[in-house]
Image (cartoon, rainbow, N blue to C red):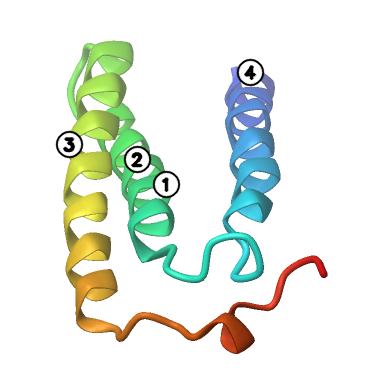
Amino acid sequence: MKYFQYSLLFIAAVPVFLLNGCTGSEAVPRNATQTGALTGALAGSVIGYNSGHHRGRNAAIGGLIGAAAGAGIGHAIDSQEPEPTPEETGGWH
């Protein structure tokens, strides 16, 4: 049973690490919304999975609620920061 849980955790964590590289500051300078949604979805899924008897359903609901909350907080942070100048954005030249 522990092997199944560890493999499920590994399968869920790999896309998170791969997709987290897509939110780099070079491509999108204001990315707190994306990072907050990803982090909230992961945290909500873990919390939902570990609570109650219907683990799959709770993980899905927790992931949706966590993504919405994280995106809302990230959007609030993004809206407080000033718009970057073209020199600050970096990226490919």
The image quadrant where one finds the C terminus is: bottom right
Q: Quick one: SS at disc 3?
A: helix
Q: Residue furthest right?
A: 93
Which residue is identified by label 1?
38
Seen at 59% across and 17% down, the residue is: 1
Give how far across and how far down residue 71 sits, in percent: 25, 51
Q: In the drawing, what numbered circle is on residue 65? A: 3
Q: Of 88 and 77, which appears nearest the observer? A: 88
Dot 3 alpha-carbon crowd within 10 angstroms: few under 14, some 14 to 19, many 20 or more: some
Label 2: how many residues lie within 10 Å, few (<14), some (14-19) or many (20+)? many
Front label number (4 vs 3): 3
User: Percent x, y for residue 36?
Assistant: 34, 57
| Residue at image point 31% right, 49% down | 40
Relative to 78, 3 lies left or right: right
Depth check, front residue: 34 or 69: 34
- Disc 4 vs disc 1: which is toward the camera? 1
10 over 74 or under it: above or below: above
88 is higher (above) or lower (below) than 49 = below
Q: Please, what is the three-letter code of the amino acid marked with disc 3? A: Ile
Q: Is residue 78 left or right of residue 29?
A: left
Single out the mark in the foreground, 4 or 2: 2
The residue beneath circle 2 is 41
The percent coordinates of residue 34 (x first, y second) are 41, 52
Residue 55: image quadrant is top left
What amino acid is found at the position of numbered circle 4 in the picture? Phe
Q: Which numbered disc, 4 or 2, marks the residue that appears first in the sequence? A: 4
Could you say which disc has been placed on residue 4 in the image?
4
Residue 61 pos. (x, y %)? 20, 23
Q: Quadrant of residue 92?
A: bottom right
User: CB under 8 Å between callouts 4 and 2?
Assistant: no
Residue kind at label 2, given as amino acid type: Ala
